[in-house]
Image (spheres, grey):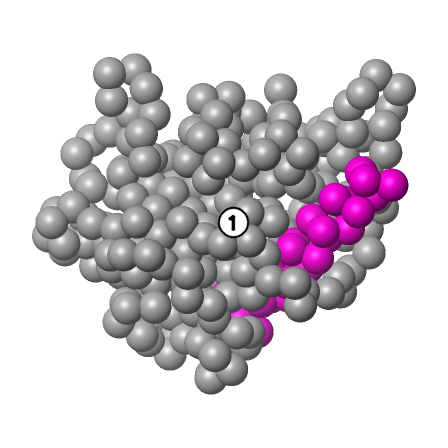
Amino acid sequence: MKKRIITVLLISCLALYVAGCGTKIEEPTAGTAIEVETDEHSEKSGEMSSEMEPTITPALASDNGDGVDNQIIISASAAAEIDMVNLPEGIIGIKSESKPNKALQQLIIDYYEIPKDFYDTTRYYYNYVDLNNDGTDEIFVVVIGPYTSGTGGSSALWVIESAGELHVNQDFTIVNTPVIVSDTVTNGAKELIIPYYGGGAESQYSVLTCSDGFYPRVADGKMIDSLNEVTGTAIIANDMLKEVEAGIWGLNLKSE
C-alpha cells in the first residue's frame, strides 16, 4: 500500500509538470507559478502542493520479484521511439541523457535531503552543456518529485565538476522544460530561456542572463511572449507526457 501511495504521488507530480509544459514549446499551457526561493542564489524548494491531482493514469509500479520496480527497467530503445516536443525553427532539440549518473544522483539526494522512501519517486533529467563558455561541459539537471516540484514547475541544478567531484554551482526553482540554451552569450555565459507560467497570466518565456557567474531567479528574468528569432539548443526536450503515458519514467534516484 505504501508503495502504491508513493507511486500515485509521483503520477500527480509528473502530471501537473507535463500538463504545464504541454507538448509544444511554442504554445505552453498556463499554470500557477509558485515562489519558493529563499535568496538570490539559494532556492531549495518545499514539498509538492497537496492540491495536486493526477490527470493521467499510467500503470503503477510493480515489483518483478527481485526488489526492483519494473518501471526502473526501461530500455533506451523504447524511450528513443518517443518524439521530442515540437520546437520552433532555429532551435534544435536534444533529449536528456538515458544513462544513470550515480555521482549526480548522490548530489541530488544530499542537496535536497531526500529521504530513502522517496528515491524511487524522484526523477531526474540531465544534459551536458557548457553554459559558461569555458570549453568544459557542466551538467544541467531538472529534478521532478515530491521534494522538488510544485504547481509552477520543478527544481533544477547547474552542476560543475571540481577536483573530481560534482558541486552545485547554482540552483533554480519553477523550472519547466525544455530549457533553451540560447546562442546569445552575455557576460561570458549563454542565456537560458525557460517556459514560465505566471499566476494564471498568459504564458511567457523567462530569459535569464548570467551576471557575476549566476543567473537570476526564473521569476525575475526578462519575459518574452514568443521564441521568434531565438536560436539555440533545447535541452531536456523529451515529450514527458507521451513518455509517461507509454510507461517510460526516466531515471530515478535508485537507477543503476
Residue farthest toward the bottom in the current orientation of the protein: 201
Q: What residue sits 62% from the left and 30% below the top?
A: 116
Indicate the quadrant where residue 123 lies.
top right
Q: Does the magenta portion include 57? A: no
Instruction: Report the side of 215 relative to 75 (left or right).
Output: left
Q: 24 or 194: nearer the eye?
A: 194
Instruction: Report the side of 11 relative to 44 (left or right).
Output: right
Residue 217: give x, y in percent of width and height. Answer: 30, 60
Q: Secondary structure at mark 1?
A: loop
Q: Is residue 161 above or below residue 147?
A: above
Instruction: Report the side of 135 relative to 93 (left or right).
Output: left
Q: 210 or 180: nearer the eye?
A: 210
Q: What residue sits 75% from the left and 62% below the top?
A: 54
What range is drawn magenta here? 1-29
Indicate the quadrant where residue 104 lies.
top left
Indicate the quadrant where residue 250 lies.
top right
Quarter containing the N terminus:
top right
Quarter containing the C terminus:
top right
Q: At label 1, which amino acid type do we have? A: Thr
Please say whether residue 179 is visible from this viewpoint. Answer: no
Residue 11: give x, y in percent of width and height. Answer: 72, 52
Q: What residue sits 67% from the left and 34% below the top?
A: 117
Residue 242: give x, y in percent of width and height. Answer: 70, 54
Q: Is residue 240 above or below residue 247?
A: below
Magenta-drawn stretch, dominant element (helix, strand or loop): helix
Q: Residues within 10 Å of mark 1 (few under 14, many from 20)?
A: many
Please say whether residue 16 is visible from this viewpoint. Answer: yes
Q: What residue sits 50% from the left and 32% below the top?
A: 109
Residue 182: give x, y in percent of width and height. Answer: 29, 55
The residue beneath circle 1 is 148
